[in-house]
Image (cartoon, rainbow, N blue to C red):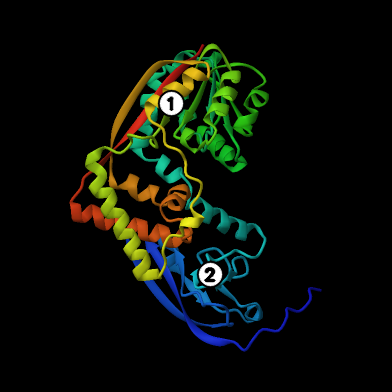
Amino acid sequence: MASSPPPFPHPTVRAITITANASTTRIKIAIPVICFPTPAIVSSIAFTCWSVLLQLIAIVRTNTMQHGRIGCVTGGISPTAWPLVVHSHAGRLHEPQILQEGPLAQRAQAQSAQGYSFSKFAGLDFYAEVNAATLDLAEIGKHHAIVDLSCGTGAISKQILERLEDAKNTVIFAIDHSAAALRDAKENIGERKDAVVKYVQGEVQNLSDLLGEKVDSVVYFNAIHYVPDKEDLLRMIREAIKPGGTFVFNSSFFKGAHPPETDRFARKWMMKSLRMLKREHGLRPIKSDKTEARQQLTPEEYYELLHEGGFEITAEEIHRIEVPIDGWYDISGFQDFIEGVMPGVPLEIARECLQKACKETWDEMELDTVPRNWMMIVASRA
């Protein structure tokens, strides 16, 4: 039998405000709960799913009051499966934490994690367009052994499969460090009788060992800017490619990605987000919590790195994409983007401010699209 929890100070009744968001609509529901004194009392818990708002039932369970927890029912997730700790420290809101184990709790946690992933942005039409253009620039369909590095949910692998000239003699290695991503990729790609797709879990530094053979091409999309040691990355990729094989990559994070005419939108959006963060939540980004800056290089600096790493540039292009509001709105829900522009701010609060400010700025400026440049490079192993 579990030991009894230590005694708590005398509880008080306070109003906890639950904030539900759906796109740019925000509705707050205040409920009285019994809670215990902490350094500071949390004032809001954010939910982003409209279906949660429609079904939201907030209750305080007798068997969890001793632990200072709040139980809630959200759709099919029972109170037992999703108890949340409500607390803060030094006046800063901490995100609710899922305490209990079990399949429903894991499902809720997975859904929350998915909410800050890149997958929503990656599913937009313009993103598929720029990746298709990069694959065509590389003439990827002529190759027979192709690596989709950091394959995620398999969108790029699917585009590669569509371009194969000799599918029955081709193998695609879909590689990712995440087992969950590989499961999604396998489901999205489905069973293929015309080509072989191998799903491999592992890290890029072990690429040659993961493959066990040399390949014709390595495809690495919108990710190279995350890698701090690009020289080492190029060395490992070169080791995995046959002589004459190609390394194909693109990135929207490089010096020159922002056309000058977009400065006004970006500046107005960020300023509005920061004012909203301070006004509505009493928070500011914490510079000391900023993730290590990712060095943004010019295309010319990438060319030099490739040359020094034993590659020759065979094709390159700066591809201008007109990004609709969906692109800017969805990138505001991507964890890496959030942590870059609002370091130290709880993800849900930062996302709320960024997305609301994005919509308001868009409407005020009466925009249809805001352009962004993608760098596309094809390099051959010398």
How many numbered circles are shown? 2
Q: In which quarter of the view is residue 322 placed?
A: top left
Would residue 164 be visible to someone looking at this image?
no
Residue 343: image tag: none
Q: According to the image, label 2 marks what residue?
A: 73
Q: Which callout, 1 or 2, points at the residue further toward the start of the chain?
A: 2
Q: In which quarter of the view is residue 109 placed?
A: bottom right
Depth order, front residue of 333/257: 257
Helix, strand or loop status at disc 1: helix
Amino acid carrying mark 2 in the image: Val
Helix, strand or loop status at disc 2: strand
Q: In which quarter of the view is residue 191 placed?
A: top right
Tell me if label 1 and label 2 are in contact, CB under 8 Å: no
Mark 1 → mark 2, Cα distance in angstroms: 51 Å
Q: Is residue 131 left or right of residue 101?
A: left
Depth order, front residue of 183/356: 356
Nearer the camera: disc 1 or disc 2: 1
Depth order, front residue of 263/100: 263
Amino acid carrying mark 1 in the image: Tyr
Work out which residue is located at the far left of the displayed protein and give it.
Answer: 366
Seen in the picture, residue 208 relative to 73 is either above or below; the reply is above
Mark 2, Cα crowd under 10 Å, few <14 / some 14-19 / many 20+, is some
Q: According to the image, label 1 marks what residue?
A: 302
Residue 243 location, x and y as percent?
55, 10
Q: Residue at x 26, y 54 (%)?
A: 268
Depth order, front residue of 244/108: 244
Q: Is residue 92 left or right of residue 284?
A: right
Seen in the picture, residue 161 relative to 23 is either above or below; the reply is above
Seen in the picture, residue 147 relative to 224 is either above or below; the reply is above
